Image (cartoon, helix red, strand yellow):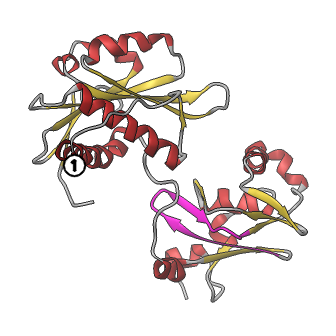
Amino acid sequence: MPSATLKLFLVYGDPTRLRTAELSNWIGKAVAGPRSEFEKLLERSECESTGIYFLTGIDPSTSKKAIYIGEAENIRSRIKAHLTKDFWNQIAFFVSKDENLTKAHVKYLEGRLIELAKESGRAHVMNSQGSGARLPESDREEMEIFLEKMQQMLPALDVEAFVPAVAKETEDQVKKEVLFCKIKNVVARGYQTPTGFIVLEGSQAVLEERASAQKWPSVLAQRNSLIEESVLMLKGDAYSFTKNTEFSSPSAAAATIHGGSANGLTAWVDSNGKSLKQIEKNEA
């Protein structure tokens, strides 16, 4: 994405409360805030416009991040209906400052955003399906630009459901940055990203958890989830990763591979045996 200047306005001076966001030289505008300030958000004039909105929180049935993506000709009247949904605790919406977004435009954006959120896999998409809309070629290209600008701003509004779960790196970049995690006869490969740590497809994880893993329920939960989702598949005397998989940190990745708690800064080493801790400190 091209570089840009993001202007955040903190309505009450608190970055966790109601705020607006704009990009330099762009017609879009975003408003975001917590559910606790829903009434104050509804009072804003932007709510009278046509736009696209996002409700984010935790899915109570899975305890995973969740998102609902919607569109409306009038944001205010539409989002009131979502007070019956109890999973969300944050809301963000986008409108056009020149008021040229139409119902067809936002339906197209809704469909595309639902696709992108599902592809990313960072959050459970609460929509049953996306409506989408067919647009003339020129309008479609305009909306793709609008979509790109939205994606550029959304992480700054704490909406990360559209950040690719696995960064699209070139093969040369991965080769330069690849690290190894070894335990017993198991070997895994991976690399750091701006959002966490990627374990590469074909990497291995131990078959049995350590006894100490019982003290760390999160390790067991993560491993069991990956097994249930067939991301970790039994192959010989170890598990094998069936696809590139992102973890929140090097330690989270190493713990899954080791079958118990692990310090990712020492568990991951480069081809010369230098640990991630040493690499970050630039030690020999």
Q: Is 192 rendered above or below residue 209?
A: below
Q: Secondary structure at mark 1?
A: helix
Q: Residue at x 89, y 58 (%)?
A: 208
Q: Which residue is mark 1?
A: 141
Residue 224 lies left or right of residue 193; in this view the side is: right
Q: Is 192 rendered above or below residue 70?
A: below
Q: Is residue 178 visible?
A: yes
Residue 11 coordinates in the image, percent (x, y): 21, 26
> Toward which corner of the image does residue 276 lie, by quadrant?
bottom right
Instruction: Assign the N terminus to one quadrant of the image.
Output: bottom left
Q: In the depicted view, which residue is nearer to us: 275 or 160? A: 160
Per the picture, the main secondary structure of the magenta-coloured stretch is: strand
Q: Is 244 rendered above or below residue 227?
A: below
Residue 194 colored in magenta in the image: yes
> Toward which corner of the image does residue 249 lie, by quadrant?
bottom right
Q: In the depicted view, which residue is nearer to us: 270 or 185? A: 185
Residue 156 lies left or right of residue 29; in this view the side is: right
Q: Residue at x 44, y 11 (%)?
A: 83
Q: Is residue 262 visible?
A: no
Residue 205 coordinates in the image, percent (x, y): 78, 64
> Toward which corner of the image does residue 191 lie, by quadrant?
bottom right
Q: Amino acid at mark 1?
A: Glu
Part of the protein shown in magenta: 186-203
Q: In the depicted view, which residue is nearer to us: 37 or 265? A: 37
Residue 217 coordinates in the image, percent (x, y): 78, 42
